[in-house]
Amino acid sequence: MSKHAPVQQRRLTIITIIIAWTFLYNLLIKGQSATAAFFKILDTISDDFVMGTLYTVLLGCGIVLMFSVTKLYTQIISNIYSFKILEEMFYDDLREGHVQRFLSKLVRFRDQPIPNAVCPERVGSLLFALTFLYVISWIYVALFSEALFFVSWSAGVDLPITPHNLLQLPSLALAIPFSARVMAYLKYPYVQDYADFMPGAVFVLLVVATLGYLFQSEDQKFFLAQIWMNKKYLILFIKNGVFLAFIPVFFEASFWLVKLSESDDTDRESVKSEDSV
């Protein structure tokens, strides 16, 4: 005799548990009569459980999406070959219609093979990479400025907003992700460990900001909200951000120029060796 219960029996057990739990929920929690609790089982499942599950699932998907995007970014900045890898993935997979394979490689970006060059080969890839760096740097200037302000506020330190710290705070905010890229340039062995803390920091910031908004907290102070309400500070913050966000782009472009020069020197030496033979 098989030790495994038939599929029909297991299915019936699961349905019975759900119905019994819902009946008790209506009876004990909602305070309905036994008759109403029984006939309201389907209403409770459709109205309470399905909608509650949908809300939870959507919220969870948002968290997963935000974590995945931030995680991907940290894997990109901690790998000096990242933009060359992205270029190969785009032309070998996405452009050929292999969308699922492309997305799978994005999720496992850290496991992709190292190419034979650092700098992308196509002009379009160069423009995309530098534009991507600039946009993401802008985002992190805003996000980590808010995060640093929140950390100070939660520790009891009230940071006054002045024209001076409108440059200092965003500069420190940009230094957090940019330092990971510098570690990648220097081939620091623990660069990924350092970069991995950033998704957690962004997650905490978003959760705290969301809770503050949902509960309409009047005590919590937000850096960007105060900047937004002061036109003078807003213009100054934008000017500083335009400058600061270009710093990673400048260093990345300089790094590629150095690598291209090294590649040219290697090619010349190879040609000279062939000519001498």
Image: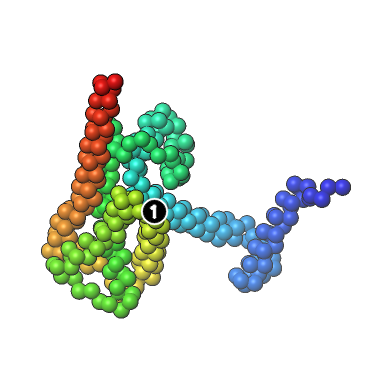
Residue 14 in view of the camera = yes
Question: Within 10 Å of the Cα at label 1, are there few (<14), some (14-19), or many (20+) other Cα atoms?
Answer: few
* Image quadrant where residue 94 sits: top left
Q: Is residue 260 visible?
A: no
Give the residue at x 60% y 70%. Answer: 30
Give the residue drawn at x 69%, y 65%.
35
Residue 195, x across and y down, in percent:
37, 56
The residue that appears at 21% across and 40% down in the rendered structure is 257
Q: Which residue lies at the image location 22% right of the left edge and 65% below the top edge? A: 169
The relative height of residue 146 versus residue 105 in the rendered view (above or below) is below
Work out which quarter of the rendered image holds the C terminus and state it. Answer: top left
Quarter where residue 244 is shown: bottom left
Please tell me whether mark 1 sits on a helix, a strand or a loop.
Answer: loop
Q: Position of residue 49 (x, y in %)?
A: 57, 59
Judged from this view, the residue extending furthest toward the front is: 277
**Residue 267 or residue 188, whichever sits in front:** 267
Would residue 7 appear left or right of 190 to someone viewing this image? right
Q: Horizontal and vertical percent for residue 254?
A: 21, 44
Q: Is residue 59 left or right of residue 152?
A: right
Image spot of residue 173 (x, y percent)? 26, 61
- The colouring scheme, among rainbow, by chain, secondary structure or one colour, is rainbow
Residue holding disc 1: 189
Q: Is residue 254 above or below residue 204?
A: above
**Residue type marked 1:** Pro
In front of the other: 22 or 186: 186
Q: Nearer the viewer, residue 28 or 223?
A: 223
Most distant residue in the bottom direction: 156
